[in-house]
Image: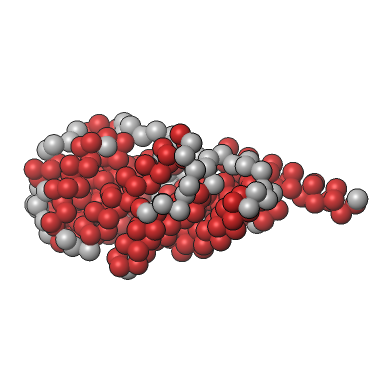
Amino acid sequence: MALSEKNQHSERLALCQYRLFMCKLDNNQERNYQRAIQFELFVDRLDEYDQLDALKDLANTYRALLRWNKVEEIVEKLKQKAEFQYKKILNNDMVHKLSRPPFTYIAYSYLLLGSVHKHNGDYEKAIQYIQMYADLDWVKDKDEDTLTWKENFEKWAKMNVLVTKLSAGDPSVLADYVAYIESNKEEVLLSLINIIEFANRYHFNIDDILQRFEVSSLITNPKYSNRLYSQQMIEELQARFNYELAHYYLNKGQNGVGFWHLIKSLEKSVSINEKHCIIKCIGLFESFREISDSGTKLAYKKFISEVYTNEKKIGSTPVG
């Protein structure tokens, strides 16, 4: 009896920590990382149902932070636990008490593992994982929610095949990818980041593509449903979007618009304490410092001063 009460107390404490973790996520990336690390200690104390949602939310947090080693670590746990729970459900050993159809946790683990391998440059492995959530014939349920989620994963698989091939340097998929973006408005910001990254890596001209989209509105007010992207992820995407645009235009010699996007990226990165992007902005600015005007230098100095001030407040080593 005492052991049962102790376990229940531990479970309640873990659930409380889970709720606090989700409530406290904000636009400060460094704080979010520390919160994720702290909450990770409580996941195994949750009941078997809540563990799946907790691991999914942890993985998404690390993904928004671009901590790909942590994403892989958490997603491997999610995949293992989700596959085990799904077998229990098929054997009628578990009451369905999840926030979404049980198969989605397995499929989502494949999706994130595909993203990890794409980020690491292992495009063949990334495609293998994409095929695993593209083919969901093993899911036999026919309810409306299940069918909607299956359609989503099939759509995401088609998109991610194109993204992966683009990342590998295949320009033949560019037209299909742009067509996909135009019919899936919620994916425009992330999709354009993928295209601009491709252009920067392989020195490809995408002026005609950029002219087809309202770039200015994506910088200030991208439209995403909360079901797909957290506010934390959207703000990180905005910082990356401006950085990639800055890189693209500066490489083309369009210095005015290039430096404007660089300062916008630095501004957003400093406001959310996104160190990865801050470091990239510093590197890009220093590469083009000699051709920057006095106004750009002044704005750059202002934001770098903020970076050092923020670092001193939290008592860590300054960036750069």
Q: Name the image quarter holding the C terminus.
A: bottom left
Say whether residue 177 is left or right of residue 143: left
Q: Please give the name of the residue rendered at 61% of the width and 49% of the height, measured from the top-left corner.
A: 89
Name the foreground residue: 298 vs 124.
124
Q: Please give the name of the residue rendered at 63% of the width and 41% of the height, measured from the top-left corner.
A: 97
Residue 107 place in picture, x, y as percent: 45, 52
Q: Quadrant of residue 232?
A: top left
Residue 186 place in picture, x, y as percent: 31, 36
Say whether residue 162 is left or right of residue 79: left
As drawn, 104 above or below 122: above
Does the rendering let one see residue 52? Answer: yes
Residue 200 place in picture, x, y as percent: 18, 57
Residue 137 place in picture, x, y as percent: 41, 52
Q: Please give the name of the residue rendered at 32% of the width and 51% of the height, measured from the top-left corner.
A: 157
Q: Please give the name of the residue rendered at 41% of the width and 37% of the height, measured from the top-left corner.
A: 148
As drawn, 207 above or below 221: below
Name the foreground residue: 101 vs 63.
101
Name the foreground residue: 312 vs 74.
74
